[in-house]
């Protein structure tokens, strides 16, 4: 019996040892399961984050494309406006040159007009003076004719 007791005690110690061993394995398995769950959760979270980043990157690429299009349109408008500005400046310079030329011509014409007016005034004065001279000469001629008639009447009477 003692041997049986010893055998039973040994078996019991072995069973307790196995139970402790199985309990440790079970704890380790639970820890491994917890780690697996943690990593799965972490992996899902990172996958969601990556999907969000991918979506945001796609949105930003669309915005970038739209902004580049707007920038190109504005660059084109600036180029057109620059050309139009240069053409306007050229037109303005030409108009200023023509205006200066017209002003010079107008001054020349005004000077010529002034000279013509002076000449006209001189001619008018000369004509007036000539008309006065003609009147004087006509009066003298009439006087001379009257005087000659009177002399001829006097000679005939004698």
Image: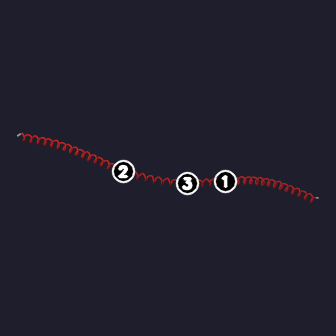
Q: How far across and how far down the image is residue 139, in percent?
A: 83, 54
Sort mark 1 into few (<14), some (14-19) or many (20+) by Cα contacts within 10 Å: few
Closer to us: 3 or 128: 3
Label 2 with label 3: CB-CB less than 8 Å: no
Q: Which mark is residue 104?
A: 1
Closer to us: 130 or 143: 130
CA gap, disc 3 and disc 1: 27 Å
Q: How far across and how far down the image is residue 48, in percent?
A: 30, 48
CA gap, disc 1 and disc 2: 69 Å
In the rendered structure, which disc, 3 or 1, sits on the residue that comes first in sequence? 3
Q: Where does label 3 land, which residue? A: 86
* Residue 113 horizontal side relative to residue 2, left or right: right
* Residue 47 horizontal side relative to residue 121, left or right: left
- Can you say whether 90 is above or below 33 in the image? below
Closer to us: 156 or 60: 60
User: Marks 3 and 1: which is nearer the front?
Assistant: 3
CA gap, disc 2 and disc 3: 42 Å
Q: How far across and how far down the image is residue 7, in percent?
A: 9, 42
In the rendered structure, which disc, 1 or 2, sits on the residue that comes first in sequence? 2
Q: Secondary structure at mark 3?
A: helix
In the rendered structure, which disc, 2 or 3, sits on the residue that comes first in sequence? 2
Image quadrant containing the N terminus: top left
Q: Which mark is residue 2?
A: none
* Residue 17 horizontal side relative to residue 90, left or right: left
Q: Where does label 2 land, which residue? A: 57
Q: Residue furthest left?
A: 1
Q: How far across and how far down the image is residue 122, in percent?
A: 76, 53
Image quadrant containing the C terminus: bottom right
């Amino acid at each position: 019996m003692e041997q049986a007791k010893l055998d039973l005690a040994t078996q019991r110690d072995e069973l307790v040892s196995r139970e402790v061993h199985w309990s440790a394995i079970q704890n380790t398995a639970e820890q491994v399961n917890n780690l697996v769950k943690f990593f799965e959760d972490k992996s899902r979270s990172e996958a969601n984050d990556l999907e969000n980043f991918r979506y945001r990157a796609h949105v930003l690429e669309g915005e970038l494309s739209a902004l580049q299009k707007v920038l190109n349109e504005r660059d084109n408008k600036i180029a057109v406006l620059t050309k139009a500005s240069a053409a306007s400046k050229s037109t303005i310079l030409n108009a200023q040159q023509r205006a200066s030329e017209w002003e010079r011509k107008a001054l020349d014409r005004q000077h010529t007009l002034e000279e013509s007016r002076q000449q006209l005034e001189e001619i008018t004065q000369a004509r007036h003076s000539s008309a006065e001279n003609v009147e004087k000469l006509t009066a003298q001629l009439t006087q001379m004719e009257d005087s000659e008639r009177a002399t001829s009447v006097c000679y005939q009477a004698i």
